[in-house]
Image: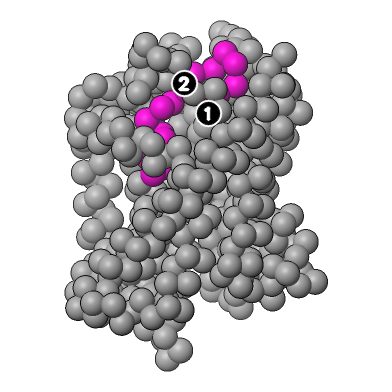
Amino acid sequence: MTVASPGTGRAAGRHDPPAAVAPPPGHPRFAAVDSLRALAALAVVVTHTATFSGFSTTTWWGAIWHNLDIGVPIFFVISGFLLYRPFLATALLSAPRTSVSGYAWRRLLRIVPAYWLALTVLGWYANLHGVFTGDWWRYYLFLQVYNHRTLYGGISPAWTLCIEVTFYALLPLYGAGMTRLCRAGRGRRGRARITAELIMLPALAIASVTLRGIDLAGPRTLLDNTILENFDWFAAGMVLAVVSVAAAQGHPLRAVSHSVARWPTACWLSALAIYVILARVVFYPVVQSGGFLYDSPGRGLLRHVVFGLIAVLFVAPAIFVSQRGLPARVLRWRVLAWLGLISYGIYLWHSPLLGKLLDHGALTWLPHHVFIVLTAATAGSAIAAAAVSYYVVERPILMLKRQFRR
């Protein structure tokens, strides 16, 4: 694994990254993020098996597993950081520029082929709702979240991909707008851009959270499954990108990256403490008459905001990497790094495969240990499917992104 210097992410290892996952030419790769993706994907698997096995509501510590959908904000924070940093580095560090067409090509290759494969195969194998109906185009074009009828159809966790795709489309517009606004460059103009980012991004995040609060207080709409009410998580990652680029430029913000690199374990322990305490005290699952888990409006909004904070504390040590502390030891684990490479497939395949296991009576297998058995079976089958998807489809297709290197 390559190791990044604090605040810059520049490679310090001897090996170049695999071509399929290499960043845009001239930009550093943050290899520790691979392992972080694996942890986030496995967390989502566990929260789903805990819910469907009843473990979330039948044990005193079920809230710990129920709230592991915190993997979603971790994914969003990672996306905000990794995708916005090259835009900033081009503006502030004179890093090589990636064209908008090249950026779009890379995003398309990364997201679409694996998703279409999983959606088609699972639509047939797991008989996913809506895939082979007149609404098929909504699922294949990431539009299912804009209709109540299709919101959780197809691959149900793919509602997050619809938000990701919207973020991909809006990010170049935001970056171009900030560049035009600040006329960024080195020296004073560069510092003006950093200051503007640190004003604009929190302001947009607050607007997103405010809109979510209004939505939660009134009749629920589809907005909570769109970028409008989830942008704050992306904005948090984009702020980390600002800190990273500012540190490389010698800005006083480098003190933040140095502090994280100096005390990475403290970041993770703080995140874990906040998560455990609030999961048990505030975010415990409530059983509705229909058997669904839900949060009250106040708790739902608090959960959303705090999860963003926890995600930042969890992601930061993977960005401002050092050789010391628990995060470095965990993120260097080769098995975890490999799972990170195939984590997109794990995320796509696990929920429909879990549904098939339930259809085959998985809840009757070893009833006293059904949560463990269901989690192992779901994770194992999802990892196997994800590995096939990665090596047969994703990696060969990702090699095509080199066509835009010029």
Picture quarter with the C terminus: top right
Report the front residue among 303 and 98.
98
Where residue 9 sits in the image (x, y, percent)? 42, 20
Q: Which residue is mark 2?
A: 17
* Residue 208 vertical placement versus 168 (above, below): below
Q: Is residue 193 magenta?
A: no
Q: Is residue 52 visible?
A: yes
Q: Which residue is mark 1?
A: 21
Looking at numbered disc 1 in the image, what kind of residue is underneath it?
Val
Q: Kindly identify the residue that appears in the image at 51 percent across and 66 percent down.
A: 352
Q: Kindly identify the residue that appears in the image at 56 percent across and 70 percent down.
A: 126
What is the secondary structure assignment of the residue under circle 1?
A: helix
Q: Kindly identify the residue that appears in the image at 36 percent across and 35 percent down.
A: 337
Looking at numbered disc 2 in the image, what kind of residue is underneath it?
Pro
Q: Residues within 10 Å of mark 2 (few under 14, many from 20)?
A: some
Report the front residue among 321 and 312.
321
Question: Would residue 341 appear left or right of 272 to someone viewing this image?
Answer: right
- Give the magenta part as a residue range: 22-38
Where residue 377 sits in the image (x, y, percent)? 35, 63
Where residue 43 sits in the image (x, y, percent)? 36, 55
Residue 138: quadrant of the picture: bottom right
What is the secondary structure assignment of the residue under circle 2?
A: loop
Residue 142: quadrant of the picture: bottom right
Picture quarter with the N terminus: top left
* Residue 364 vertical placement versus 310 (above, below): below
